[in-house]
Amino acid sequence: MAKKKRVRIKSGKCPRGLLQKATTEITGVTDAEAAAKPGYAAKSSARKGRGRLLIADTEVVHIKATGRLIKLDKNLRDCLIERMMEVAERKYSEGDFEMSISICDQMLLLDDEFAVGYSSRALAKLGLGDFEGAIEDCNRAIEIDPELAVGYNNRGFALVEQGNFLGGLSDLNKAIELNPKMWAAYNNRGYALHFLGDPELAIEDYDRAIKLEPNFIDCYNNRGMAKARIEDISGALKDYDRALILNRHYKAAWFNRAFLKQRLEEFSAAIVDYDEALEIDQNWPHAYFNRGVCKQNLGDFSSAMADYSRAAKVGRNNNLVHAQATEMLKKGWRIVDGSEKGSEDAL
């Protein structure tokens, strides 16, 4: 299918008055009426089964009928789509993936051939772990616009997450071919290369991504893992440190730095990092298990047993961690008696 050309108002350029007119045209409700009755859209939607759309934190647009969308002036429609894209992206960045998807759903009612809309919805679906749904949306985006780099990037990432590394690599190569400055695609390709057994090439891609986006937190964490794999311990620790400077609530970096310190037998320092990771996510079985291993190696057997017990409890759905934690608990009495040395096992 030939690429569909659309003329759209650039992001952030939609005049406030035009947005108000578009909102009123679709809903039949003025800004003043909406402000006076903030529950109008939600109540009406629940009662009559109609769609609802969050346009901003205090504005809710209620779509009354498909006919209104069809008759909507093109400039008004494009303006509304632009605003919806902004809010969908913001909701995604805030981790509200379901709301981002809901907004994209409504946006695609306004224009069912808006390729970027499908790609944006795919990204939110990835956030929820809906890889099949994300791939379907990316397929539709690429069908509409075969040169949409972000469509190939998002589909490539979904395929990699499914374990289809070669398929994902093909899509990510295409994304970079179409847009050599897409830093997310370099990061995702690096991730695929790492798991395909080529951490050196992965690091090259991570370097490119960071050069393009110096504050790319995920990429520092991923590059740290690749460096650890090739035994560049100092480089790995620096990358984890940088990720945590950018966001101290980034739990993966706390965990990975802790695990690297554990490998170096710096058990006390590792425990401090596992503590931080568990402060962020109190249901992380791997972190409990590994912290237990560190405590066991330091001779704090009773505390280690408590961590293994917690790992087994919260890790019921993870066969590996549950089995290993249960095994360590079975050995517990011998460990407390001092008849068995600390285990080096870690997840």
Image: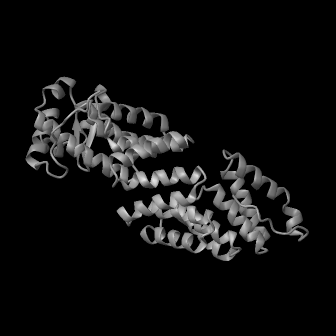
- Residue 277 shows in the view: no
Q: Quadrant of the C terminus?
A: bottom right
Q: Quadrant of residue 109?
A: top left
Nearest to the observer: residue 12 or residue 178: 178
Q: Quadrant of the N terminus?
A: top left
Q: How is the image coloured?
A: one colour
**Left or right placement of residue 190 versus residue 288 in this view:** left
The residue positioned 69% from the left and 52% from the top of the image is 313
> How many labels were placed on the picture?
0
- Residue 42's spot in the image, x, y percent? 29, 37
Q: Is residue 70 above or below residue 336?
A: above
**Left or right placement of residue 281 versus residue 320 in this view:** left
Q: Quadrant of residue 165?
A: top right
Q: Is residue 316 above or below residue 311?
A: above
Q: Is residue 145 above or below residue 178?
A: above
- Residue 183 shows in the view: yes
The residue positioned 84% from the left and 56% from the top of the image is 330
Nearest to the observer: residue 34 or residue 8: 8
- Residue 334's spot in the image, x, y percent? 89, 64
- Residue 129's spot in the image, x, y percent? 50, 42
**Left or right placement of residue 346 versus residue 72 in this view:** right
The residue positioned 61% from the left and 73% from the top of the image is 272
The residue positioned 43% from the left and 46% from the top of the image is 173
